[in-house]
Amino acid sequence: MPGEGVHLAPGKMARIAGGFYLAFVLASVLAGALGHIGMGGAEQVYQAIVTSVGSFRLALVVALISAFLFLMAAWSLYVLLRPINERLALLFLLLNAIGVAIQCASMFPLISALLLGDGASRMQAYSAPQLEGLAYLSINLYKTGFVTAQLFFGTWLFPLGYLVYKSGFLPRFLGVLLILDGFGVLIWFLQALLLPAYPAISYPAWALGFIAEVGLGLWLLVKGVEIVDTEAGLAG
């Protein structure tokens, strides 16, 4: 079949992957800025809901779009890296997809918290303190789901980092950073569930993750990759 000798995906696919990855990062930052969705604490999320409902609704939409963009980035990376090892590429795609599914599901309690303040939601029978308590319960349920997704967002970085390291067309240091980022995300996952009173434990992991994942996205978008045709022995 035509194209069987091309073992590396075209530079165009690399740039698509980089574009999706950076768009995901930007959307995540915007969702955090608008409604503290993602890294914000329960108090910050609650205040975002009660002070600006419109802004928080927009933050929810952006957060869901960011999840879609992350899945598309994983698919693009799967296409790019499957010639290196298809099984490992499929593994990181599945881990990412599970994490995205959990993250999207965790948004539903936020919608519940939003509706508690809606006069049309027939919650008038509850007092203001009761409604606030229910809102905090929904927000904390969201936070637990968001943290749970990090188990999969951490583990997907191990096969991804390994394939980046072995690819030959991406810098090996990016692969190393992604693997270290995987450990960092898992530390965050464990800290958030076991030691929630000590968030500072995870701060270095957040910085490392930003460097590793933004670095990968920028490299793919700006540099791309070369097409290697093993039958012709030429690089394009």
Image: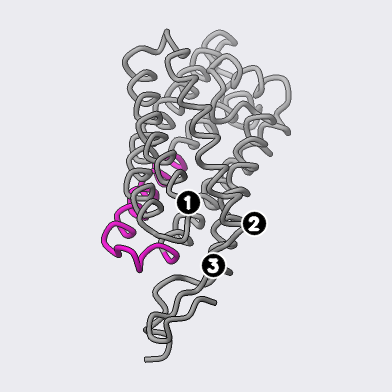
Choose top left, top right, bottom left or bottom right for residue 25. top right
Q: Kindly report the distance in space between the C-alpha atoms of the residues bearing marks 3 and 1.
A: 17 Å
Query: Callout 1: few (<14), some (14-19), or many (20+) C-alpha neighbours within 10 Å?
Result: some
Residue kind at label 2, given as amino acid type? Val
Identity of the residue drawn at 58% across and 30% down: 37
Query: In the figure, is residue 156 to the left or right of 72?
Result: left
Above or below: residue 132 compared with residue 161: above
Q: Which residue position holds label 1?
A: 171
Secondary structure of the residue carrying numbered label 1: loop
Q: Is residue 101 magenta?
A: yes
Observer-nearest of 8 and 209: 8
Q: Is residue 91 magenta?
A: yes
Q: Which residue position holds label 3?
A: 13
Identity of the residue drawn at 35% across and 45% down: 156
Query: Callout 3: few (<14), some (14-19), or many (20+) C-alpha neighbours within 10 Å?
Result: some
Residue kind at label 3, given as amino acid type? Met
Observer-nearest of 200 and 222: 222
* Labels 2 and 3 touching (C-beta < 8 A): no
Q: Kindly report the distance in space between the C-alpha atoms of the residues bearing marks 2 and 3.
A: 12 Å
Q: Nearer the viewer, mark 2 or mark 3?
A: 2
Q: Which residue position holds label 2?
A: 222
Residue kind at label 1, given as amino acid type? Pro
The kind of secondary structure the magenta stretch mainly shows is helix
Where residue 147 sits in the image (x, y, percent)? 40, 29
Above or below: residue 191 compared with residue 153: above
Extent of the magenta region: 79-105
Ranked by sequence position, the earlier of labels 2 and 3 is 3
